[in-house]
Amino acid sequence: MKFTVSTRGWAIVGAAALLLTAANSAPTVAADVARSRLATVNCAGSINVNIHPLNGAVDGRSGGNFRCATPDESFAAELTMSGSVTSSGDLFFTTRTTDTLRRTDTGQTFQFTIDRRFDRDTTAASGNATEGGSGSQAQDSGAGTFGTGTGLVTFLITNNYVLDVNV
């Protein structure tokens, strides 16, 4: 009895083995690519935050000297924040804001949510203040001063303000 050997059958088996190998390694490759895109943007400068105790609103923005950097480049940026007070006491406010970090050279934006705590050293109309915050994508801290007005407490965080954002 004579058996004929077909090379077509071996080609199909080889192609199937390659597809199975690629299918099994694809999730790992995709996960590695996604991880490699993550970078930390480190920013420094100052922020001006307005807290409206009467309605619980929070808004703020960075000062004109706000700069950010990645391991590859440095750039000017603007930070804006909008949110609400989550709790307060005589000498503190905790807030949750949605922040937007915008590169001024390209217009590229990163948005993230951050919980912050603003502490003041006195119940007087003005004094010293500290700020610290964190979220799943960002953390920040700094020190400065505060001042009060009618229905408003403004924090000027100008000393050693740093913001780290994972993008």
Image (cartoon, grey):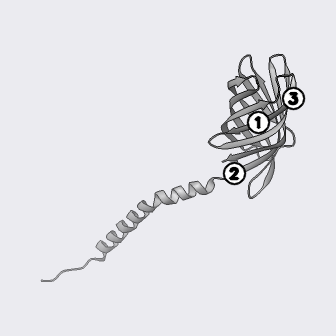
Q: Earlier in the sequence, mark 2 or mark 1?
A: 2
Residue 2 visible, this angle: yes
Q: Residue flagged by tag 3: what amino acid is it? A: Gly
Q: Earlier in the sequence, mark 2 or mark 3?
A: 2
The foreground one among 38 and 53 is 53
Q: Residue flagged by tag 2: what amino acid is it? A: Thr
What residue does disc 3 label? 127
Please state the horizontal and vertical placement of residue 17, each as a whole percent of the image.
36, 68
What residue does disc 2 label? 40
Residue at image location 41% in from the left, 65% down from the top: 21
Q: Residue 1 appears in which quarter of the rendering? A: bottom left
Residue at image location 84% in from the left, 16% down from the top: 150
SS for tag 1? strand
Callout 3: 10 Å neighbours few (<14), some, many (20+)? some
Residue at image location 52% in from the left, 56% down from the top: 30
Above or below — where is 65 with respect to 33? Answer: above
What residue does disc 1 label? 131
